[in-house]
Image: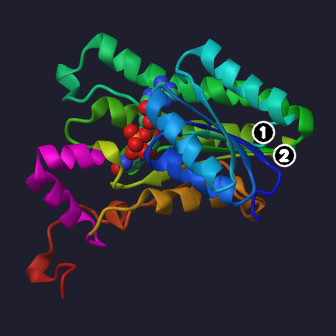
Amino acid sequence: MRLDGKVAVITGGGSGIGAATARAFTREGARVVIADINEKSGDAVAREIRATGGVIDFLHADASDPAEIERVITFATDTHGTLDVLHNNHVAFEPGRIGDLTLDGFRRSLDVGLTAYWYAIKCALVPMLAQGKGAIVNTASVSGLAGDYGLGAYNVLKAGVVNLARVTGIEYARKGIRCNAVCPGPIGTPPIDRLHDAAPQIWEDIRGAIPMGRYGRAEEIANVVLFLASDEAAFVTGTHVVADGGLWAHSGMPPIGGLGPDF
Ligand SMILES: NC(=O)c1ccc[n+]([C@@H]2O[C@H](COP(=O)([O-])OP(=O)(O)OC[C@H]3O[C@@H](n4cnc5c(N)ncnc54)[C@H](O)[C@@H]3O)[C@@H](O)[C@H]2O)c1
């Protein structure tokens, strides 16, 4: 098993990519602690995984509250004796054009989506440095590598998440601790499904812009996180892996002479 005996904390583990990662990690032998503000879904994910024999605890916690993430990491180390993997994954942000964002909304977006990732890393480094090893994976986004219309706060915080992985990766490389980011494109998780239902045509257009012609699945991102968290990625640090069906590889130019992806 690829994470046999390892202990992992996943923020936002009650849904979507975090829940898929919890399934992948436990399947591969890790003991997992998921933290989520949604008690119902977090509890449901933990029950489902336990029913399949996985070792998992759910903590109802706000990962953007320093005291709460300290509690989550202390729970993992007290319960399992150590911490090997941190997957920073939760998010919340204010949508809107740059000129329309509110000061509180912009600050809160960075607080939840970026500062909280840094603080969780700071906390996780304590047990990881003590044992001389560890792996950290941040969920970023292709939206951290380029801009989107109307998602400025998200673009800025995810760009920070990518660079947080770089600097953490280089600073702790000689301490046995790796840090990387995964950059998904559009993935069929509950928030995307809700947006799709509210505005089907826009989301059909987005789907059409993805060279593979489909959204990704949460499991496909979990597989990347699993790789980055495992010893298979022993020489991979301070970087990001894009998993987006080819979206980010496209310049944005429309097909010339009808030579599009459908042929
Ligand atoms: N779905 C996509 O298309 C997509 C694309 C690129 C990146 N991402 C990133 O993937 C990550 C997961 O997104 P998802 O699509 O699986 O979303 P999701 O809504 O399915 O899951 C996110 C979970 O985070 C929890 N959460 C939110 N704020 C929290 C907090 N302060 N503390 C603890 N938990 C909190 C939510 O309750 C939810 O269960 C996010 O970082 C998102 O930006 C998603």
Residue at the far front: name it. Answer: 51
* Residue 224 image offset from top left, x and y in percent: 57, 60
Residue at image location 67% in from the left, 25% down from the top: 72
Q: Residue at x 35, y 60 (%)?
A: 248
Can residue 158 be seen from the camera position used here?
A: no
**Which residue does the numbered mark 1 point to in the structure image?**
172
Name the chief secondary structure element in magenta.
helix
43 relative to 91 in the view: left or right: right
Q: Which mark is residue 176?
A: 2
Q: Residue 181: horizontal and vertical position, in percent?
A: 56, 48
Report the amino acid beneath label 2.
Gly
Q: Quadrant of ligand 1?
A: top left
Closer-to-camera residue (111/22): 22
Relative depth, front residue between 11 and 46: 46
What element does badge 2 sit on? loop
* Residue 172 falls inside the magenta stretch: no
The reply to whether callout 2 and callout 1 are in contact (CB within 8 Å) is yes
Span shown in magenta: 192-213
